[in-house]
Image (spheres, rainbow, N blue to C red):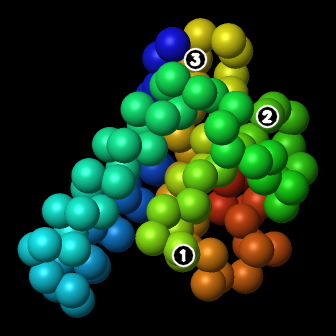
Amino acid sequence: MVVEWTDTALSVADKTLVYTYFTYGQMQADKLRSEFRKVTQRIERFPRLGPVEYHIHKEGEYRYIIIFKILKVIYRIDNPEHISIITIWDCRRNPDDLEDNVSKN
């Protein structure tokens, strides 16, 4: 099983880590980085662990895992051997904007 982060997901994760570092400090940024790694490992072992993301109406099986109560790691199961992490979504944002954000991938 291969889990690949898209360029968009990497960019959003990087921005989120920078924001976390400057707002909450090094320790919280390190915890968030660790959570990103753990989520990647969980998805690799159990691809259908996260619930289906119903705000995305595109072809494909989109799922998510929530971290720190406000961030969704949204991923797509492309085939039984490949998963793409699409983006990191702040749950405080309007969910109707999610599909537009994912359409860029």
Inspect this view and state whether residue 63 appears.
Answer: yes
Instruction: Indicate the position of residue 3 as horizontal and vertical percent values.
Output: 47, 26
The residue carrying pointer 1 sits among few (fewer than 14), some (14 to 19) or many (20 or more) residues within 10 Å by Cα, namely few
Tell me the CA gap for discs 1 and 2.
22 Å
Q: Quadrant of the C terminus?
A: top right
Amino acid type, mark 2 = Glu
Q: Decide: marks 3, 1 in contact (CB < 8 A)?
A: no
Name, please, the residue furthest toward the left.
Answer: 26
The residue carrying pointer 2 sits among few (fewer than 14), some (14 to 19) or many (20 or more) residues within 10 Å by Cα, namely some
- Residue in view at x 52 percent, y 68 percent: 71
Amino acid type, mark 3 = His
Q: Residue 70 got which mark?
A: 1
Tell me the CA gap for discs 2 and 3.
12 Å
Residue ID for mark 3: 82
Residue 97 drawn above or below residue 86? below
- Residue in view at x 51 percent, y 23 percent: 45
Amino acid type, mark 1 = Ile
Tell me the CA gap for discs 3 and 1.
26 Å
Q: Quadrant of residue 30?
A: bottom left
The disc, 2 or 3, on the residue closer to the chain's N-terminal end is: 2
Q: Secondary structure at mark 1?
A: loop
Residue ID for mark 2: 61
Inspect this view and state whether residue 5 appears.
Answer: no
Instruction: Indicate the position of residue 72 as horizontal and vertical percent values.
Output: 57, 61
Instruction: Indicate the position of residue 22 as horizontal and vertical percent values.
Output: 17, 84
